[in-house]
Image (tube, rainbow, N blue to C red):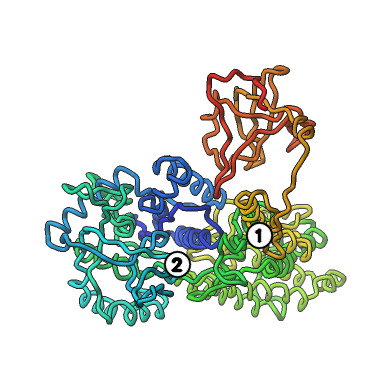
Amino acid sequence: MAEKQTFYITTPIYYPSGKLHIGNSYTTIACDVLARYKRLQAFDVFFLTGTDEHGLKIEQKAQDLNMTPKEYVDMMAASIQELWKKLEITNDGFIRTTDEQHEKAMQKIFQKLLDQGDIYLGAYEGWYSVSDEEYFTESQLAEVYRDENGKMIGGKAPSGHEVQLVKEESYFFKMSKYADRLVKYYEEHPDFIIPQTRKNEMLNNFIKPGLEDLAITRTSFDWGIKVPNDPKHVVYVWIDALCNYITALGYGSENEELFNKYWPADVHMVGKEIVRFHTIYWPIILMALDLPLPKHIIGHGWLLMRDGKMSKSKGNVVYPEMLSERYGLDALRYYLMRAVPFGNDGTFTPEDFVSRVNYDLANDLGNLLNRTVAMINKYRGGVIPPLVSDVTAFDLDLENCADDAITEFEKEMDQAHFSLALEALWKFVSRSNKYIDETEPWILAKDETKASELDSVLAHLAASLRLIAILLQPVMTHAPKEIFAQLGLPTEKMMIKNVSYFDLPEKTTVVKKGTPIFPRLDLEEEVAYIQSKMTKNEKQKGRKAMKEAGQAEFDPEKTTLKTTKKEIRFDKFDKVEQRVALIKDVSRVKGADKLLKFRLDAGDEGERQILSGIATWYPEPEKLIGKKVIAVTNLQPRKMRGEISQGMLLSAEYGDQVQLITVPDEIPAGSLIG
């Protein structure tokens, strides 16, 4: 039996400086869709993602939160892995640049490049953006600040982040040594960088003007991989990060079996903002290591908002959990794959999202399934008739359309043109709906001489739905199984490789009554809901402004601060009873991703139960057992997800994090706070 052809696909590894939004999730979902598709094409797939955990920005973020860098990245890596689990990402590996294997391999790589003369020690002076972890020349900056004498004193990177002048000893990589070889590789491999416009940008903006040697270490901070034999230097975050694609497969370790099997990568999927690092620095590193280059680097566009990029400061961030929890994961995954045209930016609007769900999913696909199941039940007692070709005048056209859909879908998916692949499939969905109108099965059912035509129509509709469900499997994780189940077919995955429209099992019994897999949404109501979630960030920003301005009240509509202090009388505050409570047990609430159930000893009336929506920030809640917290104990009990909650736990919000307020162990449970 021949071995399967391998396919290695990677996301960029994410910088855990904040919570990931749907723009970040787009890349991972896109890779997941391609990985699922290749598996259904009988490929042996390895799909890698992970986190990029070193650098000055992480060190500063941890300090701001009074945490060690390792504590901070452990917390963020756990939350990112939990997000990928919720989005049903099927990654085979998850690398962290703090993994011991990666750090050891990175030191070996550095030493090898140093020994062969590709790295040398020098001194660097330049403008550095902490937020971007990147150096910029004056000409690359979007804005430059000068003093009264015209001397440059600062500026802004293209990202809008401030830069600062950095002067320090640094090791340099001889990028210039490999520039001509890189250009030649571009010429000999025209599909190395996808789309073509990204390659032209790299050549014209960075390589042809002269590729400068790259400073690859820092001495001004400590959070990073130490340079062998010179530990005051830590490896520059981008060099460290890029090597993850090979160290995750065991390169530089005692076991390089995965590396030998899967390298070179078939696809590195990255956002367009980091194409330069992946198409200039990374190929040169690989050339210096005498390793094959990845086959394709895809620089996709961004998912933008009406007012530009998603930004917490703009209050326009949309998080994937919010959409998937309310509308279902399939709706989110489908929308993201349709919304970003290949190579270009897409724009998210609540109106477009809800309309896509209503028209594409509820009207087109959902209606096709509902009508088909209902008619098979009504006219044939729930049994799908055998599929026979060319009985009605419209059968052959539908069959040809099915063949075209398979061909187009596979062609576009092979090139990671997700929106075009779905567009091709939806042409077939529309054609199948039109087939119902053309054949008018309700008319055929009234004429016994038309029984064979009615059989053909019902069988063709079932075959169409089966094919649609098979092709949708990489994109949607639930709807295809629902379609199979409603058609009475096995719900396990069906291969896309060699799929045929005519492989419909005979005499299959459909469900008695199908449940709509995509209920129609109220446009006005759902748009308002999404907008309210988007503006929640603006309100949080307002609360922060209130604290900084002495409890001034923030008016988000006027975006001004009104210095009207909201004060309460002491006697009202005095009515709130707060006690120290010992956590006896903590567990997750079934069916509620965000809720934790606490069993507490507050020293007042035996044990009490409190539910708190902080599960996101405590991936290992059992570690809280034995800690002492502050509970509000005289609130009226309320029911949440069928459980009684007898109070509230006090927590602190900072940045994207929420943390329970704990008290010293020596304070007895039941002690009053006040």
- Foreground: disc 1 or disc 2: 1
Q: Which residue is mark 2?
A: 271
Q: For marks 1 and 2, give the CA distance.
A: 23 Å
Q: Is residue 392 above or below residue 48?
A: below
- Amino acid beneath label 1: Met
Residue 301, image x and y in percent?
49, 71
Residue 669 visible? The answer is: yes
Residues at marks 1 and 2 touching, judged by CB atoms closer than 8 Å: no
Q: Residues within 10 Å of mark 1 (few under 14, many from 20)?
A: many
Please identify the quarter of the rendering in which residue 218 is found: bottom left
Extreme residue in the right direction: 446
Seen in the image, is 80 located left or right of residue 48? Answer: right
- Residue furthest out toward the left: 116
Mark 1 sits on what residue? 534
- Residue 238 located left or right of residue 393: left
Q: What's the residue type where badge 2 is placed? A: Gly
Visible in this render: residue 481? no
| Left-right relation of 147 to 631 | left
Identified at 43% across, 45% down, the residue is: 63
The picture places residue 4, in percent across and down from the top left corner, at 36, 57
